[in-house]
Amino acid sequence: METLVNYFQHIPSYQRSLILAGGLVLFWIIEGAIPLFRFRYRRIRHAGLNLFFTLTTIIVNFAFATLIIRAADYTTVHHTGLLYVVRLPLWAFTLVGLLVLDLIGAWFIHWLHHQVKWLWKFHLVHHSDTWVDTTTANRHHPGESVLRALFTLIAVIVAGAPVWLVFLYQSLSALFSQFNHANISLPKGLDNVLAWILVSPDMHKVHHHYRRPLTDTNYGNIFSIWDRLFGTYRHVRDTKGLVFGIDTHPEETEHNRVGALLNMPFQTYRPPTEESSSTVVAAASSPYSGDKN
């Protein structure tokens, strides 16, 4: 455990970048070999579009890096934050810290994006992807990336997380996002067991169904327990019946062009529709999803 702490305490920036790039390449290769959905799309072009937004996310995160590091250093020196309310062994300190960072920096801001109309309009860039794969993980409008970075800063202050824990969380957050967006499916039994604690690929795919109510479920990134605790968890037995994208932006000219995606938050709000529980996974042959294995 101390070795892990020491590594992330002194991890160079290029190694953090390698973790991000390495996870992306790994899941890109795996989903190319054994895809859950056989999408009819230009895979390289789709990746290029999503990598543009990955780049803008990285730029925003670098802009916030100094603030986050200073906040982490302050909490370490002054022992402020939830992690210092009681003295914890290192393993518990790490686990509780990751839980708090994940709750505020990922789950809560994600939930807010689905509750507030103007935030949802920014979040549409992510949900409008009709070909969800590992590159979708960082497909966020720059405006949304700013808000996510701001809530990460808030999470660091509330938790009292030291720098090494922040870097560990950010690395795990990136890897889990790439993992649970990847166009793969684990053996059903393994996925179900994993989803009791962590966000599995099948669990997150439910969130990317193109219509409510499934769109407004399964907000988690690392830990699935938040959705179970707050009543937003939903299980779908057959994920091959899911339809990706968002019903308010079905045209490729709107969801597959950089300019259109950057302008999406500034359009007039389009209220999403809702389907009955008996049809939430019916449309398996919809053109949104392409061919299934």
Image (cartoon, helix red, strand yellow):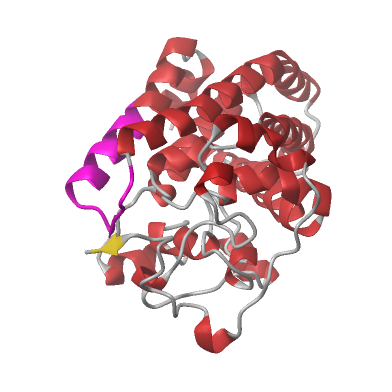
**So how many labels did they put on this image?**
0
Residue 102 shown in magenta: no
Q: Name the residue: 28% across, 62% down.
A: 291
In this orientation, which residue lies closer to the viewer: 282 or 206? 282
Q: Quadrant of residue 237?
A: bottom left
Find the magenta span and give its range. Answer: 22-41
Given the current orientation, which residue lies at the most extreme left position?
33
Q: Quadrant of residue 60?
A: top right
Q: Position of residue 143 (x, y in %)?
A: 73, 32
Quadrant where the image shows the N terminus: top left
In this orientation, which residue lies closer to the viewer: 202 or 125? 125
Left of 286 or right of it: where is 102?
right
In this orientation, which residue lies closer to the viewer: 8 or 64? 64
Q: Is residue 71 above or below residue 170?
A: above
Quadrant where the image shows the C terminus: bottom left
Q: Position of residue 83 (x, y in %)?
A: 71, 39
Dominant secondary structure (helix, strand or loop) of the stretch shown in magenta: helix
Left of 252 or right of it: where is 110?
right
Q: Name the residue: 55% across, 35% down.
A: 169
Q: Name the residue: 48% across, 33% down.
A: 50
Q: Position of residue 72 (x, y in %)?
A: 71, 23
Q: Name the residue: 42% across, 27% down.
A: 20
Q: Position of residue 232 (x, y in %)?
A: 64, 69
Q: Is residue 95 visible?
A: no
Q: Is residue 277 above or below residue 122?
A: below
Q: Is residue 265 above or below residue 49?
A: below
Given the current orientation, which residue lies at the most extreme bottom position?
278
Q: Is residue 91 above or below residue 200?
A: above
